Image (tube, coloured by chain):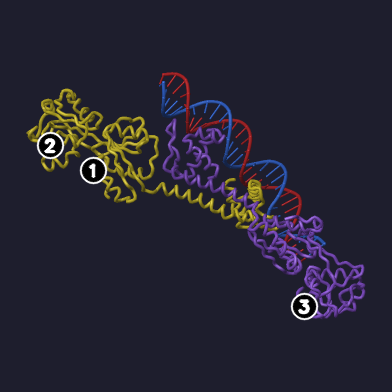
Chain colours: A purple, B yellow, C red, D blue
Amino acid sequence: MDLHHLRIFVEVYRQKSFSKASEKLYLSQPTVSEHIKSLEFELGCSLFDRLGRSIIPTKEAEILFPRALSVLEQVERLKEEITTAQDEVKGQLTIGASTIPGTYILPLIAAKFKKKYPQVSFEILIEDSRKITDMVLNHELIMGVVGAVMEPEKLNYVPFIEDELILVATDRIINKETMPPSELRSIPFVIREPGSGTRNTMERFLKTKDLPIEDLNIVATLGSTDSVKQALKASLGASILSKYAVEDELKSGVLKEIKLQGFKMKRHFSIITHKKRTLPNPYNTFYEFLISYSPESQKHPAKD
Amino acid sequence: MDLHHLRIFVEVYRQKSFSKASEKLYLSQPTVSEHIKSLEFELGCSLFDRLGRSIIPTKEAEILFPRALSVLEQVERLKEEITTAQDEVKGQLTIGASTIPGTYILPLIAAKFKKKYPQVSFEILIEDSRKITDMVLNHELIMGVVGAVMEPEKLNYVPFIEDELILVATDRIINKETMPPSELRSIPFVIREPGSGTRNTMERFLKTKDLPIEDLNIVATLGSTDSVKQALKASLGASILSKYAVEDELKSGVLKEIKLQGFKMKRHFSIITHKKRTLPNPYNTFYEFLISYSPESQKHPAKD
DNA sequence: GCATTTTATAAATTTTTCTTATGAGTCTAT
DNA sequence: ATAGACTCATAAGAAAAATTTATAAAATGC
């Protein structure tokens, strides 16, 4: 039994005529006869008594009619629901992010997005870049924001906003406005654990200035940006951190930025998605929203 | 979109694999691919992300799955319901009957039938044979019991129980146990209206004895068996009536049967149905039940 | 009875479905 | 890294079905 059979049956029942039904359905009359016949065969009963010039539905047809209608309606509704679901922006969005974007950047953007689409709710999962990348690879996450490109073959990387790593410390550790990169060797350092995007980026940049991490005077390796900041405030040492992470501390003067002469450590965060996955519409919409914060559009930010 | 598509979709969703689904469905894998593709085209979205070795259902597939299941279940239920409806004996049975069977015979049989199938309810419509026959012809009635064969081309006639028309009167009208048919001319008669089965049958029988109705001494023509009986009891005249109609009066002695020498007016009632109509199951069951009261089975009546 | 209407049947055609064969991409294990 | 196994996609041919045209059969209405 197919929906086609039911559609034809319903029309014949309504018209009380094979030939009139065939016109309505833009089919020939024998086609209608044939389909009713096969329905009757499948159900093991006749559906219409052929009186010659007219037909009368049997008891079974009376039972079938409302049910057939209901099935057909349900299928129509189903199609509609899937179509509209494709345009809706609602439901839970789980975004994975490494520390800096997850702590200092995404919450603000998510709040703006939610103002525009109140039916969404956010979960921002903060893990280091490696973990977030793996989760997107394993489909445990649909979207992530990370600071390092790790799987360009399997994941889409779209540049997100730009970040800059800066040298910060209290006056007690470094009492200068500016210094040459080579002097970094003599300064006590508090740094993040390996695997952290900040640590990776920092290492990469320092290597370009011939400053392998082993040459530094590491006084502590800590597991979070916040703990590093606490250590800095306690004048345990200096560190190289995202400007976003120390925005408040620089404003209040607790920490100071020491400019490194001729040395900018800029990076950008990337939005990552699996190349093979289709984004559910809410994610897709949020994706577009995020891209409007990407480097190019920084100069002409989207108005909302 | 067809049920077939949904069936295939459901299996792919369950197996999370095109090839496993194809095995389950006894189809080749390309067929499954093709059907999913056409579903995706029709819905305007992809349903599975092909990762290479595995697939992941998209958001739309998550929405579609429970709905598709529900549609398929509904169709299965529908088939079952129609199948079981074909075996059920319940609902209202409307039987048309002429006066004698409708008044004196069917109520008893209907009561027995209802004892066996408590879910049925009866409506016995009493009209004269002509009217009942017409109603079956026009499909206003599905089944009738009448005393005259009027449309053997279009209706099925199945012999029902046998009746005998007998001459009855009070002692004051005829004070004999028996008489020759020829003496009927001298007796005052109360008779039924034309169109009545009793009247038709009576006329037909009398004609065989060369006694046209015009030769009788008609003192009254009445519209119902009961009114004729009342007239007889008031000794207005004699009448020829069904033995079933005067059963009680003969027993109590209010009326007496006068045997007509060498003259039996036997007839049988017939169950009529339209040749082109399929009987709904309750009618069909009742039909069989009635036939067990037909002349042949009279000697070996069904036990119940 | 004859013209008209309606469904059934038959044969041919078109469309759809399905299969086999093959290719391309992915994962696993060596 | 690469071979082998696995999975889905594509293409072409075969099979099945749906559909049409033409025609027959049955019934109604005049």
Of mark 1 and mark 2, the one earlier in the sequence is 2
- What's the amino acid at mark 3? Gln
Percent x, y of residue B289: 31, 44
Task: Give SS at disc 2.
Answer: helix
Q: Residues within 10 Å of mark 2 (few under 14, many from 20)?
A: some
Q: Residue at x 24, y 40 (%)?
A: B103
Answer whether residue B52 is visible to the viewer in this image. no
Q: Is residue B265 left or right of residue A197?
A: left
On the rendered image, what quadrant is the C terminus of chain A found in? Answer: bottom right
- Compared to residue A209, the image places residue B52 above or below, namely above
| Residue B266 figure quarter | top left
Q: Is residue B292 left or right of residue A136?
A: left
Q: Residue at x 63, y 49 (%)?
A: A83
Q: Which residue is mark 2?
A: B233
- What's the amino acid at mark 1? Lys
| Chain to which the residue tagged by mark 3 belongs | A
Q: Which mark is residue B299?
A: 1
Task: Kindly report the distance in space between the C-alpha atoms of the residues bearing marks 3 and 1.
Answer: 110 Å
Task: Give SS at disc 3.
Answer: helix
Of A21 and B110, which appears nearest the observer? A21
Task: Kindly report the distance in space between the C-alpha atoms of the residues bearing marks 3 and 2.
Answer: 122 Å
Task: Kindly report the distance in space between the C-alpha atoms of the residues bearing marks 1 and 2.
Answer: 34 Å
Of B80 and A101, which appears nearest the observer? A101
Q: Which residue is mark 3?
A: A230
- Residue depth check, mark 3 versus mark 1: number of the one nearer the observer: 3
